[in-house]
């Protein structure tokens, strides 16, 4: 077997992205930041898929993390980006810890539909809330990071660099988790839950912990996206947003923690180009891309990297 170089690849990729935070044009920095933010959400979704579950409601935690960061800045008067990232992660983790007590009991389509239902409940509440901007949402602004004041010309670059760092840490943690006993246990739950119980492990506990972890990652991604865009709205919790995350996870595959970020960046790049050059048919282009992947790369884009590694 060839040695696992995932952490090295993550470090090299993160280093390149940190350099790009300094020299890349603002438009590219924005695109990369949004792609990495969505990659964090998909990273948690991959963890659930490894456990045999598909969530159609990760928009719940994505939007919750974004709104928690925005509320902290606008109503809490705490405009520090580091605190906003922490608030988004903790808020989503707390809600996932509560909802997970129920959701960890369900499997297959029942789990998927319940996650979707909770996401739409939050969407409905946000749409009806005039205090949170209703359908228009509201803007947010962070003027500092970890207590260091930032000039207007470097804020977006610093926030992008912070997103790169937290994405690197999250990917390394999840890689270590999946490479160890817990990762094998999660796969065993997906394969045969009854045998896991016979061996003395708790399938419910595995699903619950993975769900909370996925919720926390989605909240972190939502807070990163809120900082990148500077605006939050209920569409972040809508079912189409959750569908995007599932699309991205299928696009990249679940074999490696790098796959969610690669597929998210590819997705954002293709959508941006399609919106620019074919604004009326970009959804059709994405649909055709999905069809091609299912037919020719059922394991996702990462399967190409695996084939190249085998031939090297």
Image (cartoon, rainbow, N blue to C red):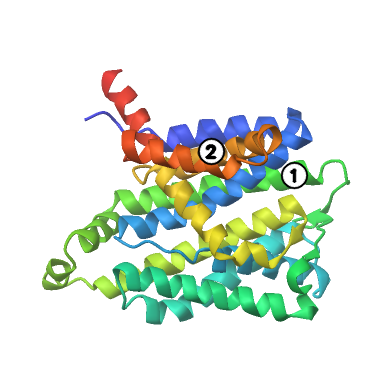
Front residue of this view, candidates 277 and 255: 277
Occupied quadrant, residue 86: bottom right
Occupied quadrant, residue 235: bottom right
Residue 21 appears at what percent x and percent y? Answer: 71, 35
**Mark positioned earlier in the residue sequence (1 or 2):** 1
Instruction: From the image, tell me which residue sits under label 2.
Output: 285
* Camera sees residue 257: no
Most extreme residue toward the top, as rendered?
312
| Residue drawn 78% across the image and 36% down it | 26
Quarter of the rendering occupied by the N terminus: top left
Secondary element under disc 2, as helix, strand or loop, is helix
Tag on residue 26?
none
Label 1 neighbourhood size at 10 Å, few (<14), some (14-19), many (20+)?
A: some
Instruction: From the image, tell me which residue sits under label 1.
Output: 158
Left or right of 95, for residue 231: right
Quarter of the rendering occupied by the C terminus: top left
| Residue drawn 82% across the image and 41% down it | 154
Give the label, 1 or 2, closer to the camera.
2
| Residue drawn 71% across the image and 42% down it | 30
Q: Is residue 103 above or below residue 231?
A: below
């Amino acid at each position: 077997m060839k040695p696992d170089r995932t952490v090295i690849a993550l470090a090299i990729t993160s280093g390149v992205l940190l350099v790009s935070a300094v020299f890349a044009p603002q438009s590219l920095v924005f695109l990369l930041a949004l792609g990495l933010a969505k990659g964090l959400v998909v990273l948690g979704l991959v963890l659930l898929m490894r456990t045999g579950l598909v969530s159609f409601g990760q928009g719940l935690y994505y939007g919750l993390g974004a709104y928690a960061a925005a509320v902290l800045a606008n109503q809490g008067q705490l405009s520090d980006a580091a605190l906003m990232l922490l608030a988004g992660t903790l808020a989503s983790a707390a809600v996932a810890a509560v909802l997970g007590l129920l959701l960890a009991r369900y499997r297959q389509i029942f789990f998927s539909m319940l996650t979707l239902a909770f996401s739409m409940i939050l969407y409905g509440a946000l749409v009806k809330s005039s205090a949170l901007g209703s359908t228009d949402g509201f803007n947010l602004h962070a003027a500092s990071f970890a207590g260091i004041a930032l000039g207007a010309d470097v804020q977006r670059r610093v926030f992008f660099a912070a997103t790169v760092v937290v994405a690197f840490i999250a990917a390394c943690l999840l890689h270590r988790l999946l490479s160890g006993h817990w990762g094998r246990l999660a796969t065993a739950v997906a394969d045969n839950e009854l045998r896991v119980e016979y061996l003395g492990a708790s399938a419910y506990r595995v699903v619950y912990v993975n769900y909370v972890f996925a919720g926390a990652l989605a909240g972190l991604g939502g807070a990163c996206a809120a900082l990148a865009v500077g605006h939050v709205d209920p569409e972040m919790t809508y079912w189409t947003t959750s569908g995007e995350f599932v699309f991205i996870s299928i696009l990249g595959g679940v074999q490696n923690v790098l796959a969610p970020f690669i597929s998210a960046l590819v997705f954002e790049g293709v959508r941006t180009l399609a919106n620019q050059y074919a604004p009326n048919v970009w959804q059709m282009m994405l649909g055709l891309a999905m069809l091609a992947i299912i037919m020719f790369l059922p394991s996702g884009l990462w399967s190409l990297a695996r084939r190249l590694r085998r031939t090297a």
